[in-house]
Image (cartoon, coloured by chain):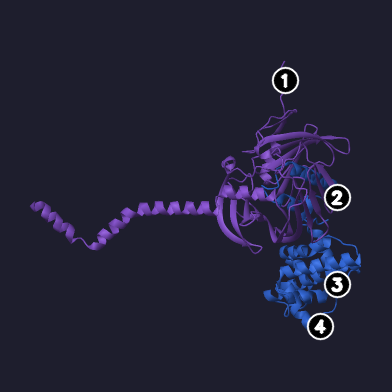
Chain colours: A purple, B blue
Amino acid sequence: MQCSSAMNRVVDRRPASYWLVLGLCCLLPLQVLGAEAKVSTDSAADSVSPSVLLARMTEAVRSLNYEGTLVYLHQNRLETLSLDHRIADGQIEERLIALSGPIRAVASGKDRVNCVLTDGQPISVERQGGRFLDTEGIDPGALQDHYSVEYLGRARIAGRETEVVGILPKDDLRYGYRFHIDRETALPLKSDLIDRRQEPLEQLMFTSIKLNAPTASRPETPLEPARSVRSAPATSPSSQWRFEPMPDGFDLVMQHQIDQTDGTRVEHFLFTDRLSSYSIYIEPSSDDGLEGDANIGSVHAAGRRFDGHQITAVGEVPMVTVQAAIAGVHRADPPTQ
Amino acid sequence: MTDEPRQRLSALQDGELAPAQMPALLDALAADTELRERWERYTLIGQAIRGEAIDPNARALADRVRDALATEPTILCPRRLERAPHRWTGRYAGLALAASVLLVAVLATPVFMGDAVGPTAVGPVAARLVERQTLPLQRWHLEHPELASKLDRYLVTHQATAPSTGAKGLLPYAMLVGYEPGR
Protein backbone atom coordinates (compact mmCIF):
# COMPACT_ATOMS: atom_id res chain seq x y z
CA MET A 1 0.00 0.00 0.00
CA GLN A 2 2.77 2.27 0.93
CA CYS A 3 4.56 1.49 -2.23
CA SER A 4 1.47 2.09 -4.32
CA SER A 5 0.88 5.34 -2.58
CA ALA A 6 4.44 6.37 -3.31
CA MET A 7 3.99 5.59 -7.04
CA ASN A 8 0.83 7.58 -7.14
CA ARG A 9 2.65 10.46 -5.70
CA VAL A 10 5.38 10.11 -8.35
CA VAL A 11 2.80 9.94 -11.11
CA ASP A 12 0.94 12.85 -9.74
CA ARG A 13 4.05 14.95 -9.80
CA ARG A 14 4.42 14.64 -13.58
CA PRO A 15 3.35 17.75 -15.39
CA ALA A 16 0.00 17.82 -17.11
CA SER A 17 1.72 18.49 -20.44
CA TYR A 18 3.31 15.01 -20.25
CA TRP A 19 -0.09 13.38 -20.27
CA LEU A 20 -1.27 15.68 -22.94
CA VAL A 21 1.61 14.69 -25.25
CA LEU A 22 1.20 11.02 -24.40
CA GLY A 23 -2.50 11.18 -25.14
CA LEU A 24 -1.93 12.91 -28.42
CA CYS A 25 0.66 10.31 -29.39
CA CYS A 26 -1.87 7.57 -28.73
CA LEU A 27 -4.43 9.35 -30.81
CA LEU A 28 -2.06 10.04 -33.70
CA PRO A 29 -2.42 6.66 -35.49
CA LEU A 30 -6.17 7.04 -35.40
CA GLN A 31 -5.79 10.53 -36.77
CA VAL A 32 -3.63 9.30 -39.65
CA LEU A 33 -6.08 6.53 -40.42
CA GLY A 34 -8.85 9.05 -40.43
CA ALA A 35 -6.92 11.36 -42.71
CA GLU A 36 -6.21 8.56 -45.17
CA ALA A 37 -9.84 7.61 -45.20
CA LYS A 38 -10.73 11.22 -45.84
CA VAL A 39 -8.27 11.50 -48.77
CA SER A 40 -9.52 8.33 -50.39
CA THR A 41 -13.08 9.51 -49.93
CA ASP A 42 -12.18 12.77 -51.57
CA SER A 43 -10.47 10.87 -54.34
CA ALA A 44 -13.53 8.83 -54.99
CA ALA A 45 -15.69 11.90 -54.87
CA ASP A 46 -13.52 13.91 -57.25
CA SER A 47 -12.56 10.98 -59.44
CA VAL A 48 -8.88 11.80 -59.16
CA SER A 49 -7.89 8.19 -59.48
CA PRO A 50 -5.52 8.29 -62.46
CA SER A 51 -7.09 5.14 -63.89
CA VAL A 52 -10.55 6.66 -63.77
CA LEU A 53 -9.32 9.92 -65.27
CA LEU A 54 -7.54 8.17 -68.12
CA ALA A 55 -10.59 6.03 -68.82
CA ARG A 56 -12.80 9.13 -68.87
CA MET A 57 -10.37 10.86 -71.21
CA THR A 58 -10.34 7.96 -73.65
CA GLU A 59 -14.10 7.79 -73.63
CA ALA A 60 -14.39 11.55 -74.18
CA VAL A 61 -12.05 11.46 -77.18
CA ARG A 62 -14.04 8.69 -78.84
CA SER A 63 -17.46 10.08 -78.14
CA LEU A 64 -17.31 13.89 -78.37
CA ASN A 65 -17.25 16.24 -81.34
CA TYR A 66 -15.01 19.24 -80.87
CA GLU A 67 -12.85 21.70 -82.69
CA GLY A 68 -10.29 24.18 -81.59
CA THR A 69 -6.93 25.82 -81.94
CA LEU A 70 -3.82 24.28 -80.48
CA VAL A 71 -0.31 25.44 -79.95
CA TYR A 72 2.44 22.92 -80.42
CA LEU A 73 5.68 23.68 -78.61
CA HIS A 74 8.84 21.82 -79.46
CA GLN A 75 12.48 22.81 -79.20
CA ASN A 76 11.45 26.33 -78.19
CA ARG A 77 9.43 26.67 -81.36
CA LEU A 78 5.77 27.31 -81.50
CA GLU A 79 3.36 26.16 -84.19
CA THR A 80 -0.32 26.87 -84.32
CA LEU A 81 -2.59 24.04 -85.35
CA SER A 82 -6.28 23.80 -86.07
CA LEU A 83 -8.15 20.66 -85.09
CA ASP A 84 -11.50 19.29 -86.14
CA HIS A 85 -12.48 16.10 -84.33
CA ARG A 86 -15.78 14.42 -85.01
CA ILE A 87 -17.50 11.09 -84.72
CA ALA A 88 -19.07 10.05 -87.99
CA ASP A 89 -20.82 6.73 -88.42
CA GLY A 90 -19.35 5.58 -85.16
CA GLN A 91 -15.81 6.31 -86.27
CA ILE A 92 -13.37 8.99 -85.22
CA GLU A 93 -12.43 11.44 -87.94
CA GLU A 94 -9.76 14.01 -87.25
CA ARG A 95 -8.28 16.80 -89.28
CA LEU A 96 -5.24 18.70 -88.11
CA ILE A 97 -3.93 21.66 -90.09
CA ALA A 98 -0.86 23.77 -89.43
CA LEU A 99 -1.88 27.42 -89.41
CA SER A 100 1.60 28.89 -89.48
CA GLY A 101 4.21 28.36 -92.13
CA PRO A 102 3.71 26.21 -95.20
CA ILE A 103 0.50 24.23 -95.41
CA ARG A 104 0.70 20.90 -93.69
CA ALA A 105 -2.26 18.79 -92.76
CA VAL A 106 -3.19 15.33 -91.65
CA ALA A 107 -6.63 13.79 -91.85
CA SER A 108 -7.38 10.45 -90.30
CA GLY A 109 -10.57 8.58 -90.97
CA LYS A 110 -11.96 5.12 -90.62
CA ASP A 111 -9.81 3.43 -93.21
CA ARG A 112 -7.12 5.85 -94.20
CA VAL A 113 -4.71 8.47 -92.97
CA ASN A 114 -4.02 11.21 -95.48
CA CYS A 115 -1.15 13.55 -94.99
CA VAL A 116 0.06 16.63 -96.81
CA LEU A 117 3.55 17.71 -95.94
CA THR A 118 5.46 20.55 -97.50
CA ASP A 119 8.33 18.69 -98.97
CA GLY A 120 6.90 15.63 -100.60
CA GLN A 121 4.02 13.96 -102.29
CA PRO A 122 0.78 13.65 -100.40
CA ILE A 123 0.84 10.48 -98.35
CA SER A 124 -2.17 8.24 -98.04
CA VAL A 125 -1.91 5.18 -95.86
CA GLU A 126 -4.52 2.52 -95.44
CA ARG A 127 -5.09 1.33 -91.93
CA GLN A 128 -3.72 -2.15 -92.31
CA GLY A 129 -5.39 -5.06 -90.62
CA GLY A 130 -8.43 -3.11 -89.55
CA ARG A 131 -8.68 -0.13 -87.31
CA PHE A 132 -6.15 0.07 -84.57
CA LEU A 133 -7.43 2.98 -82.64
CA ASP A 134 -7.12 2.36 -78.98
CA THR A 135 -10.59 1.84 -77.66
CA GLU A 136 -9.69 0.36 -74.35
CA GLY A 137 -7.94 3.27 -72.80
CA ILE A 138 -4.83 2.88 -70.79
CA ASP A 139 -4.64 0.09 -68.29
CA PRO A 140 -2.23 1.25 -65.59
CA GLY A 141 -1.88 -2.32 -64.40
CA ALA A 142 -0.49 -3.44 -67.73
CA LEU A 143 2.01 -0.59 -67.77
CA GLN A 144 3.39 -0.91 -64.27
CA ASP A 145 6.56 -2.73 -65.29
CA HIS A 146 7.81 0.20 -67.31
CA TYR A 147 5.73 3.20 -66.27
CA SER A 148 4.19 4.61 -63.15
CA VAL A 149 0.79 6.22 -63.51
CA GLU A 150 0.30 9.07 -61.07
CA TYR A 151 -2.12 11.83 -60.27
CA LEU A 152 -0.10 15.05 -60.35
CA GLY A 153 -2.59 17.69 -59.26
CA ARG A 154 -4.71 20.36 -60.85
CA ALA A 155 -4.00 23.11 -63.35
CA ARG A 156 -5.84 25.61 -65.49
CA ILE A 157 -5.70 25.30 -69.26
CA ALA A 158 -7.59 27.36 -71.84
CA GLY A 159 -9.54 28.90 -68.99
CA ARG A 160 -10.73 25.54 -67.74
CA GLU A 161 -9.89 23.48 -64.68
CA THR A 162 -7.97 20.31 -65.40
CA GLU A 163 -6.73 17.27 -63.53
CA VAL A 164 -3.14 16.33 -64.32
CA VAL A 165 -2.20 12.68 -64.78
CA GLY A 166 1.29 11.50 -65.56
CA ILE A 167 2.37 8.27 -67.19
CA LEU A 168 5.99 8.36 -66.15
CA PRO A 169 8.60 6.16 -67.79
CA LYS A 170 10.82 4.16 -65.49
CA ASP A 171 13.78 3.95 -67.87
CA ASP A 172 15.30 5.71 -70.87
CA LEU A 173 13.91 3.31 -73.48
CA ARG A 174 10.52 5.02 -73.76
CA TYR A 175 8.76 8.32 -73.35
CA GLY A 176 5.88 9.09 -71.05
CA TYR A 177 2.96 11.50 -71.13
CA ARG A 178 1.42 14.12 -68.93
CA PHE A 179 -2.23 14.85 -69.61
CA HIS A 180 -4.22 17.84 -68.44
CA ILE A 181 -7.73 16.42 -68.42
CA ASP A 182 -10.66 18.80 -68.46
CA ARG A 183 -12.72 18.31 -65.30
CA GLU A 184 -15.96 18.87 -67.15
CA THR A 185 -15.55 17.13 -70.50
CA ALA A 186 -12.54 14.89 -69.71
CA LEU A 187 -10.85 15.96 -72.94
CA PRO A 188 -7.05 16.21 -72.84
CA LEU A 189 -6.59 19.97 -73.10
CA LYS A 190 -2.83 19.68 -72.85
CA SER A 191 -0.61 16.73 -73.65
CA ASP A 192 3.10 16.67 -72.89
CA LEU A 193 5.56 14.13 -74.13
CA ILE A 194 8.05 13.69 -71.28
CA ASP A 195 11.25 11.82 -70.66
CA ARG A 196 12.33 9.90 -67.60
CA ARG A 197 13.12 13.11 -65.71
CA GLN A 198 9.65 14.41 -66.54
CA GLU A 199 11.15 17.08 -68.75
CA PRO A 200 8.67 17.97 -71.50
CA LEU A 201 9.98 17.22 -74.99
CA GLU A 202 6.89 18.27 -76.91
CA GLN A 203 3.79 20.02 -75.68
CA LEU A 204 0.41 20.32 -77.34
CA MET A 205 -2.16 22.58 -75.79
CA PHE A 206 -5.59 23.89 -76.68
CA THR A 207 -5.83 27.65 -76.59
CA SER A 208 -9.50 27.49 -77.48
CA ILE A 209 -11.88 24.59 -77.77
CA LYS A 210 -15.50 24.34 -78.78
CA LEU A 211 -17.70 21.34 -78.23
CA ASN A 212 -20.01 20.54 -81.12
CA ALA A 213 -23.31 18.75 -81.07
CA PRO A 214 -23.23 15.08 -81.97
CA THR A 215 -23.59 14.47 -85.67
CA ALA A 216 -26.97 13.23 -86.79
CA SER A 217 -25.59 10.06 -88.24
CA ARG A 218 -24.12 8.99 -84.95
CA PRO A 219 -25.36 5.51 -84.19
CA GLU A 220 -27.11 4.58 -81.01
CA THR A 221 -24.41 2.16 -80.07
CA PRO A 222 -20.93 3.29 -79.15
CA LEU A 223 -17.95 2.68 -81.35
CA GLU A 224 -17.80 -0.80 -82.68
CA PRO A 225 -15.21 -2.92 -80.95
CA ALA A 226 -11.91 -2.60 -82.67
CA ARG A 227 -8.72 -4.50 -82.38
CA SER A 228 -6.37 -2.76 -80.09
CA VAL A 229 -2.67 -3.04 -80.44
CA ARG A 230 -2.34 -2.27 -76.78
CA SER A 231 -4.07 -5.44 -75.76
CA ALA A 232 -2.89 -7.57 -78.66
CA PRO A 233 -1.00 -10.63 -77.55
CA ALA A 234 2.65 -10.83 -78.36
CA THR A 235 3.10 -12.75 -81.55
CA SER A 236 5.94 -14.55 -83.27
CA PRO A 237 7.34 -13.38 -86.57
CA SER A 238 6.04 -15.56 -89.37
CA SER A 239 8.64 -14.42 -91.86
CA GLN A 240 12.30 -15.27 -92.00
CA TRP A 241 13.19 -12.41 -89.69
CA ARG A 242 13.79 -12.57 -85.97
CA PHE A 243 14.07 -9.71 -83.51
CA GLU A 244 16.18 -10.73 -80.56
CA PRO A 245 17.12 -9.23 -78.31
CA MET A 246 14.38 -6.61 -78.36
CA PRO A 247 14.46 -3.42 -76.30
CA ASP A 248 13.25 -4.31 -72.83
CA GLY A 249 9.47 -4.43 -72.53
CA PHE A 250 8.61 -4.31 -76.25
CA ASP A 251 6.77 -7.14 -77.98
CA LEU A 252 5.92 -7.81 -81.60
CA VAL A 253 2.17 -7.40 -81.93
CA MET A 254 1.52 -7.03 -85.66
CA GLN A 255 3.13 -7.78 -88.98
CA HIS A 256 2.08 -7.38 -92.57
CA GLN A 257 3.45 -6.66 -96.01
CA ILE A 258 3.14 -3.46 -98.00
CA ASP A 259 3.40 -3.36 -101.77
CA GLN A 260 5.12 -0.14 -102.75
CA THR A 261 4.49 1.85 -105.89
CA ASP A 262 7.88 0.90 -107.33
CA GLY A 263 6.93 -2.77 -107.22
CA THR A 264 8.99 -3.72 -104.20
CA ARG A 265 7.49 -5.20 -101.09
CA VAL A 266 8.18 -4.04 -97.56
CA GLU A 267 7.64 -6.15 -94.49
CA HIS A 268 6.27 -4.11 -91.61
CA PHE A 269 6.56 -5.24 -87.99
CA LEU A 270 4.97 -3.28 -85.14
CA PHE A 271 6.32 -3.47 -81.59
CA THR A 272 4.83 -1.94 -78.47
CA ASP A 273 5.26 -1.91 -74.72
CA ARG A 274 1.50 -1.24 -74.46
CA LEU A 275 1.98 2.50 -74.70
CA SER A 276 5.04 3.43 -76.75
CA SER A 277 5.65 1.76 -80.06
CA TYR A 278 8.00 1.53 -82.99
CA SER A 279 7.90 -0.11 -86.38
CA ILE A 280 10.58 -2.05 -88.21
CA TYR A 281 10.48 -2.06 -92.02
CA ILE A 282 12.52 -4.56 -94.00
CA GLU A 283 12.89 -4.31 -97.78
CA PRO A 284 15.44 -5.21 -100.43
CA SER A 285 18.45 -2.90 -100.31
CA SER A 286 18.23 0.22 -102.41
CA ASP A 287 20.20 3.42 -102.81
CA ASP A 288 17.86 5.52 -100.73
CA GLY A 289 17.97 3.47 -97.55
CA LEU A 290 18.78 5.01 -94.19
CA GLU A 291 22.15 4.10 -92.80
CA GLY A 292 22.59 5.63 -89.38
CA ASP A 293 20.20 7.83 -87.44
CA ALA A 294 17.63 10.50 -88.18
CA ASN A 295 14.90 12.19 -86.24
CA ILE A 296 12.05 14.67 -86.29
CA GLY A 297 11.96 15.95 -82.77
CA SER A 298 11.24 13.01 -80.55
CA VAL A 299 10.40 10.68 -83.44
CA HIS A 300 13.52 8.69 -84.14
CA ALA A 301 14.62 6.47 -86.97
CA ALA A 302 17.61 4.20 -87.36
CA GLY A 303 18.62 2.08 -90.30
CA ARG A 304 21.24 -0.36 -91.49
CA ARG A 305 21.87 -2.73 -94.34
CA PHE A 306 21.97 -6.40 -93.59
CA ASP A 307 22.32 -9.33 -95.92
CA GLY A 308 21.01 -7.55 -99.01
CA HIS A 309 18.17 -5.91 -97.12
CA GLN A 310 17.48 -2.49 -95.74
CA ILE A 311 16.29 -2.49 -92.12
CA THR A 312 14.68 0.70 -90.82
CA ALA A 313 13.08 1.34 -87.44
CA VAL A 314 10.80 4.35 -86.91
CA GLY A 315 8.96 5.32 -83.77
CA GLU A 316 8.11 7.83 -81.14
CA VAL A 317 10.73 6.39 -78.84
CA PRO A 318 14.25 7.48 -77.87
CA MET A 319 17.08 6.99 -80.33
CA VAL A 320 18.65 4.27 -78.20
CA THR A 321 15.48 2.20 -78.58
CA VAL A 322 15.34 2.25 -82.39
CA GLN A 323 19.08 1.58 -82.48
CA ALA A 324 18.66 -1.43 -80.22
CA ALA A 325 15.69 -2.53 -82.31
CA ILE A 326 17.60 -2.71 -85.61
CA ALA A 327 20.65 -4.19 -83.93
CA GLY A 328 18.60 -7.21 -82.88
CA VAL A 329 17.28 -8.04 -86.37
CA HIS A 330 18.61 -11.26 -87.86
CA ARG A 331 17.47 -14.10 -90.07
CA ALA A 332 15.93 -17.20 -88.63
CA ASP A 333 18.24 -20.15 -88.50
CA PRO A 334 17.69 -22.46 -91.48
CA PRO A 335 15.81 -25.61 -90.52
CA THR A 336 18.12 -28.49 -89.75
CA GLN A 337 17.33 -31.63 -91.70
CA MET B 1 1.55 40.53 -75.34
CA THR B 2 -0.64 43.56 -75.71
CA ASP B 3 -2.19 44.59 -78.97
CA GLU B 4 -0.07 47.68 -79.33
CA PRO B 5 3.21 46.04 -80.40
CA ARG B 6 1.25 43.82 -82.77
CA GLN B 7 -0.46 46.78 -84.36
CA ARG B 8 2.82 48.59 -84.72
CA LEU B 9 4.39 45.48 -86.19
CA SER B 10 1.60 45.28 -88.71
CA ALA B 11 2.04 48.97 -89.50
CA LEU B 12 5.78 48.43 -89.98
CA GLN B 13 5.04 45.54 -92.29
CA ASP B 14 2.80 47.82 -94.35
CA GLY B 15 5.30 50.66 -94.29
CA GLU B 16 2.92 52.83 -92.32
CA LEU B 17 4.70 53.07 -89.00
CA ALA B 18 5.63 56.56 -87.89
CA PRO B 19 9.41 56.99 -87.96
CA ALA B 20 9.38 58.17 -84.37
CA GLN B 21 7.89 54.86 -83.23
CA MET B 22 10.35 52.73 -85.12
CA PRO B 23 13.31 52.67 -82.68
CA ALA B 24 11.16 51.51 -79.80
CA LEU B 25 9.61 48.76 -81.91
CA LEU B 26 12.99 47.60 -83.19
CA ASP B 27 14.24 47.45 -79.62
CA ALA B 28 11.22 45.37 -78.69
CA LEU B 29 11.84 43.10 -81.67
CA ALA B 30 15.43 42.56 -80.65
CA ALA B 31 14.39 41.58 -77.16
CA ASP B 32 11.21 39.64 -77.76
CA THR B 33 11.34 36.23 -79.46
CA GLU B 34 7.59 36.02 -79.76
CA LEU B 35 7.47 39.35 -81.50
CA ARG B 36 10.11 38.24 -83.98
CA GLU B 37 8.19 35.06 -84.70
CA ARG B 38 5.11 37.19 -85.24
CA TRP B 39 7.05 39.33 -87.68
CA GLU B 40 7.97 36.18 -89.59
CA ARG B 41 4.35 35.08 -89.71
CA TYR B 42 3.18 38.49 -90.86
CA THR B 43 5.80 38.43 -93.57
CA LEU B 44 4.70 34.97 -94.64
CA ILE B 45 1.06 35.99 -94.72
CA GLY B 46 1.94 39.04 -96.81
CA GLN B 47 3.91 36.92 -99.24
CA ALA B 48 1.08 34.43 -99.53
CA ILE B 49 -1.48 37.17 -100.13
CA ARG B 50 0.69 38.81 -102.76
CA GLY B 51 1.30 35.44 -104.40
CA GLU B 52 5.06 35.75 -104.03
CA ALA B 53 7.43 32.83 -103.94
CA ILE B 54 7.86 31.55 -100.39
CA ASP B 55 11.21 30.17 -99.43
CA PRO B 56 10.93 28.15 -96.22
CA ASN B 57 14.66 28.62 -95.67
CA ALA B 58 14.06 32.27 -94.98
CA ARG B 59 12.32 31.52 -91.71
CA ALA B 60 15.25 29.57 -90.36
CA LEU B 61 17.78 32.16 -91.40
CA ALA B 62 17.54 34.30 -88.28
CA ASP B 63 18.20 31.29 -86.06
CA ARG B 64 21.10 30.23 -88.18
CA VAL B 65 22.59 33.71 -88.05
CA ARG B 66 22.18 33.74 -84.29
CA ASP B 67 23.74 30.30 -83.94
CA ALA B 68 26.62 31.27 -86.15
CA LEU B 69 27.19 34.43 -84.18
CA ALA B 70 27.23 32.43 -80.99
CA THR B 71 29.73 29.90 -82.24
CA GLU B 72 31.88 32.07 -84.45
CA PRO B 73 31.86 35.58 -83.10
CA THR B 74 35.02 36.51 -84.97
CA ILE B 75 33.12 36.36 -88.25
CA LEU B 76 31.27 39.48 -87.28
CA CYS B 77 33.55 42.33 -88.29
CA PRO B 78 37.14 41.74 -87.30
CA ARG B 79 38.52 44.37 -89.68
CA ARG B 80 36.35 47.07 -88.29
CA LEU B 81 37.68 46.19 -84.88
CA GLU B 82 41.18 46.86 -86.15
CA ARG B 83 40.24 50.09 -87.85
CA ALA B 84 38.48 51.61 -84.92
CA PRO B 85 39.90 49.98 -81.82
CA HIS B 86 38.96 52.81 -79.52
CA ARG B 87 35.33 52.99 -80.51
CA TRP B 88 34.60 49.29 -80.63
CA THR B 89 36.37 47.91 -77.64
CA GLY B 90 34.38 46.52 -74.79
CA ARG B 91 32.02 43.58 -74.55
CA TYR B 92 28.91 45.71 -74.61
CA ALA B 93 29.84 47.16 -77.94
CA GLY B 94 30.29 43.61 -79.28
CA LEU B 95 26.95 42.50 -77.97
CA ALA B 96 25.23 45.53 -79.40
CA LEU B 97 26.84 44.85 -82.75
CA ALA B 98 25.74 41.22 -82.69
CA ALA B 99 22.21 42.25 -81.84
CA SER B 100 22.21 44.78 -84.64
CA VAL B 101 23.40 42.26 -87.21
CA LEU B 102 20.79 39.78 -86.03
CA LEU B 103 18.07 42.38 -86.17
CA VAL B 104 19.03 43.47 -89.65
CA ALA B 105 19.08 39.85 -90.74
CA VAL B 106 15.65 39.20 -89.26
CA LEU B 107 14.13 42.30 -90.74
CA ALA B 108 15.84 42.17 -94.07
CA THR B 109 15.62 38.49 -94.88
CA PRO B 110 12.00 38.25 -95.97
CA VAL B 111 12.51 41.24 -98.23
CA PHE B 112 15.45 39.56 -99.90
CA MET B 113 13.66 36.30 -100.35
CA GLY B 114 10.34 37.68 -101.35
CA ASP B 115 11.34 40.51 -103.62
CA ALA B 116 14.51 38.97 -104.97
CA VAL B 117 16.48 42.08 -104.20
CA GLY B 118 20.12 41.75 -105.11
CA PRO B 119 22.79 41.30 -102.47
CA THR B 120 23.59 44.28 -100.33
CA ALA B 121 25.95 44.86 -97.49
CA VAL B 122 24.06 42.32 -95.37
CA GLY B 123 23.65 39.73 -98.09
CA PRO B 124 27.17 38.36 -98.29
CA VAL B 125 27.45 38.07 -94.51
CA ALA B 126 24.22 36.15 -94.28
CA ALA B 127 25.10 33.92 -97.19
CA ARG B 128 28.46 33.05 -95.77
CA LEU B 129 26.98 32.12 -92.43
CA VAL B 130 24.28 30.04 -94.08
CA GLU B 131 26.84 27.88 -95.77
CA ARG B 132 28.45 27.04 -92.49
CA GLN B 133 25.30 26.00 -90.70
CA THR B 134 23.01 23.07 -91.25
CA LEU B 135 19.34 23.69 -90.82
CA PRO B 136 18.31 22.85 -87.28
CA LEU B 137 14.78 21.80 -88.10
CA GLN B 138 15.14 20.03 -91.40
CA ARG B 139 12.81 17.08 -91.55
CA TRP B 140 14.82 14.05 -90.52
CA HIS B 141 17.98 16.18 -90.87
CA LEU B 142 18.67 14.45 -94.15
CA GLU B 143 20.16 15.73 -97.35
CA HIS B 144 18.26 13.33 -99.58
CA PRO B 145 14.63 14.28 -100.23
CA GLU B 146 13.81 10.76 -101.45
CA LEU B 147 14.99 9.22 -98.21
CA ALA B 148 13.17 11.85 -96.14
CA SER B 149 9.98 11.14 -98.09
CA LYS B 150 10.38 7.44 -97.52
CA LEU B 151 10.81 8.00 -93.78
CA ASP B 152 7.73 10.23 -93.84
CA ARG B 153 5.77 7.37 -95.41
CA TYR B 154 7.11 4.96 -92.85
CA LEU B 155 6.18 7.32 -90.05
CA VAL B 156 2.65 7.88 -91.33
CA THR B 157 2.22 4.13 -91.75
CA HIS B 158 3.48 3.60 -88.23
CA GLN B 159 1.16 6.24 -86.79
CA ALA B 160 -1.78 4.82 -88.72
CA THR B 161 -1.12 1.40 -87.27
CA ALA B 162 0.09 2.15 -83.78
CA PRO B 163 -2.24 3.11 -80.97
CA SER B 164 -2.68 6.82 -81.01
CA THR B 165 -6.01 8.52 -80.56
CA GLY B 166 -7.22 8.47 -77.04
CA ALA B 167 -4.09 7.19 -75.47
CA LYS B 168 -1.62 9.80 -76.59
CA GLY B 169 -3.98 12.56 -77.52
CA LEU B 170 -3.04 14.29 -80.71
CA LEU B 171 0.67 14.37 -80.16
CA PRO B 172 1.60 11.82 -82.83
CA TYR B 173 -0.31 13.75 -85.48
CA ALA B 174 1.02 17.06 -84.24
CA MET B 175 4.49 15.69 -84.78
CA LEU B 176 3.61 14.95 -88.39
CA VAL B 177 2.40 18.41 -89.26
CA GLY B 178 3.95 20.53 -86.54
CA TYR B 179 7.47 20.38 -87.87
CA GLU B 180 8.23 22.85 -90.54
CA PRO B 181 10.96 21.59 -92.81
CA GLY B 182 13.88 23.81 -93.50
CA ARG B 183 14.20 22.85 -97.11
* Quarter of the image where the C terminus of chain A is located: top right
Within 10 Å of the Cα at label 2, are there few (<14), some (14-19), or many (20+) other Cα atoms?
some
- The mark that comes first in sequence, 2 or 1, is 2
Residues at discs 1 and 4 in contact (Cβ within 8 Å): no
Tell which of A292 and A336 is nearer to you. A336
Amino acid of disc 4:
Pro
Residue B19's tag is: 4
The secondary structure type at the circle numbered 2 is loop
Q: Amino acid at mark 2?
A: Gly
Residue at x-position 59% and y-position 52%: A165
Q: Earlier in the sequence, mark 3 or mark 4?
A: 4
Q: Which mark is residue A120?
A: 2
Q: Is residue B81 above or below residue A58?
A: below
Report the residue marked by disc 1.
Answer: A335
Give the amino acid at mark 3.
Ala
Question: How many numbered marks are there?
Answer: 4
Measure how far apart labels 2 and 3 are at the Cα level: 35 Å
Q: Is residue A39 left or right of residue B60?
A: left
At which x and y percent is residue B27? Answer: 73, 76
Q: In the rendering, at what x and y percent does residue A265 appear?
A: 83, 34
